[in-house]
Image (tube, rainbow, N blue to C red):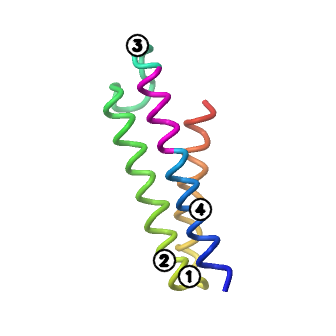
Amino acid sequence: MRAPFIARTMALAGGGMVLASWVLIVADRHTPVTNNWGTPLGAALEALAVLSFCVVGARIAGQQPANPIGWVLPSGGLLLELGWVGG
């Protein structure tokens, strides 16, 4: 079964991007934050919320690979994190 491996990899990639975004938030803390919360702490909490999407989706996809929600959640989380880290 490759589904648990792929799901775990997606969760780890999401976690890596959350760490990268936290490093960028700390390194660039004097620049105004353009998220909805308006503070670096808010941006970090928002990244943590997106990480929960990746982890929950990976858990669902690892246990029930036929469940589409298990693949939609980490995919959406990865795309959001990719947009934040790249933007």
Which of the marked residues, 1 or 2, is nearer the chain's N terminus? 2
What x and y, as percent, mark residue 52?
41, 58
Residue for point 47% across, 74% down: 59
Q: What kind of residue is marked 1?
A: Asn
Q: Residues within 10 Å of mark 2 (few under 14, many from 20)?
A: many
**In this view, 41 is above or below 45:** above
Check if mark 2's residue and mark 4's residue have beta carbons within 8 Å. no
C-alpha gap between disc 1 and disc 4:
16 Å
Residue for point 44% across, 53% down: 51
Residue at the disc numbered 1: 67
Q: Is residue 20 magenta?
A: yes
Residue at the disc numbered 2: 60
Check if mark 2's residue and mark 3's residue have beta carbons within 8 Å. no
On screen, residue 19 versus residue 9, left or right, reads: left
What x and y, as percent, mark residue 14?
54, 53
- List the single residue furthest toward the right: 2
Which of the marked residues, 1 or 3, is nearer the chain's N terminus? 3
Q: Secondary structure at mark 1?
A: loop
Image quadrant assignment for residue 44: top left
Q: Which residues are magenta?
A: 18-27
Q: Secondary structure at mark 2?
A: helix
On screen, residue 46 versus residue 71, left or right, reads: left
Between marks 1 and 4 in the image, the one whose residue lies nearer the viewer: 4
| Numbered tag placed on residue 10 in the rendering | 4
